[in-house]
Image (cartoon, coloured by chain):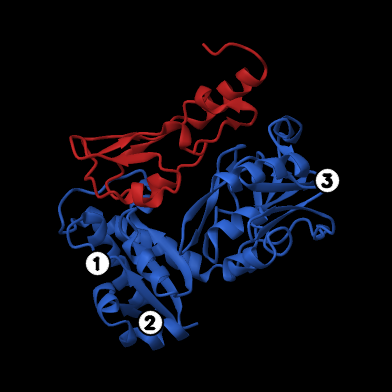
Amino acid sequence: MIRAILACSGLDKPEGSVAREVAIRVAAATGSEIICPVLLNRAPARYKKALGESALIVVDGCPTRCASKLATTLQATVDRKVLISDAVKATGRSLKPALTLAPDDLALTQSIVDELLRNLNAPTPVEELASAFESPTEYIVVAHDKFEFRIPAVDYLFNENDVWVRALDGVARVGISDYMQQKLTDINYFDSPKADGTVAQFGELGTLESAKAVFEIIAPASGAIVAVNPAVVANPGLINEDPYGAGWLVELKLTAWQQDIELLVDGGAYADVVKRKAAED
Amino acid sequence: MSETTFMSVQRDKIPWFPTIDYNKCTFCMECDTFCPHHVYERRHGDPKLVVANPNNCVVFCRACSKTCGPEALSFPDKTKILAQIKQIRAGESVK
């Protein structure tokens, strides 16, 4: 696979120094082209070929996520992302405020590189545990102005954060509602949770990004994350096309379902939530 | 406009909203630009940014903090807030 790397060049922060170093090392290990964000911003035509033909790795330094925003502005398709400040936190260490990286910062940088390379080489996350989920056939439709928001009439439960859950034999699929996918518009990145982690109800199951917004996926139920939808990771547009079917996000092995249900609403009650939210938009 | 209820609980009974650490905030206004719910408000005086409409904040959403370069935004502990919501739903008083 041909890859290109778009990294924060953050010259004024240590996270930027790490991002730059990560880009150089990953490029060397994978034979990828490095895209200069400053030049890309100034003359996007220079990288038209690289962006069009390569799987893009985006390396952001800090949560301002300049590189991600640049990719979004240019409508580039992103294959993988790393946020250095989060990656550093995940190691339990912190960077020194200096812009020149000390030996232990470089060791930390290499560990981030190693993790990224492992992810790049890993097979697409995990198998689907339950395949008996069928797309809904009966919908409640909430109409607002020129929009119509579909909500499955049965089998799907919702939290008020616009995330659905459908349970079957102790396993559940999770996704976002038609209302939320329309509100986000074209979704271009699914920052997925780790497929071997666990989540508590109302914890975070990753984020979705569109040109318009970043959406935090609030878990509708507690459980072990047993699958991340590889088709959506590869093509987040599936969420827009089929939010209740092919656009599912993760599968959970449920751990407290009877308790979790109490804080969820059914399709009819969620329709009232959508009506209220649409009126406030 | 604020949501009036969340999970059948009056929104103003749920203390979920961001807190700005003014020792870290650089007033880049990324959070205010990002948040579609007008939780933040820019001011001419000091400080230049405040959490003006805390009850507009979507309960359990922390997306604005992901836009904050200097990591100046924090939110309450979700588990504690959830426990409070459950208590209120059960008709108990919150300590």
Q: Residue at x 71, y 65 (%)?
A: A246
Q: Position of residue A7 (x, y in %)?
A: 32, 68
Q: Is disc 3 placed on a helix, strand or loop?
A: loop
Read off the chain for label 1. Answer: A
The crowding category of the residue bearing disc 2, from other C-alpha atoms within 10 Å (few below 14, some 14 to 19, many at least 20), is: few
Q: CA distance from mark 1 to mark 3?
A: 48 Å
Mark closer to the chain start, 2 or 1: 1
Residue A66, by quadrant, is bottom left
Looking at the image, residue A34 sits to the left or right of residue B60; the answer is left
Give the CA separation, mark 2 to mark 1: 19 Å
Q: Which residue is mark 3?
A: A169
Q: Is residue A224 visible?
A: no
Amino acid type, label 1: Ser
Task: Looking at the picture, tell me which residue is in the foreground, A179 or A55.
Answer: A179
Cα separation, mark 3 vs mark 2, equals 45 Å
On the same chain, marks 3 and 2? The answer is yes
Chain identifier of the residue bearing label 3 in the image:
A
Q: Amino acid at mark 3?
A: Asp
Identified by mark 2, the residue type is Gly
Q: Earlier in the sequence, mark 3 or mark 2?
A: 2
Q: Residue at x 47, y 55 (%)?
A: A214
Q: Residue at x 47, y 26 (%)?
A: B15
- Is A62 drawn above or below residue B57 in the view shown? below
Tell me: A218 left or right of B19: right
Query: What element does badge 2 sit on?
Result: loop
Instruction: Name which of mark 1 and mark 3 comes first in the sequence.
Output: 1
Q: What residue sits right under mark 1 in the picture?
A: A9
Q: Which residue is mark 2?
A: A31
**The color chain A is rendered in:** blue
Of discs 2 and 1, which sits in the foreground? 1
Mark 3 or 2: the one toward you: 3
Between A17 and A28, the one nearer to me in the picture: A17
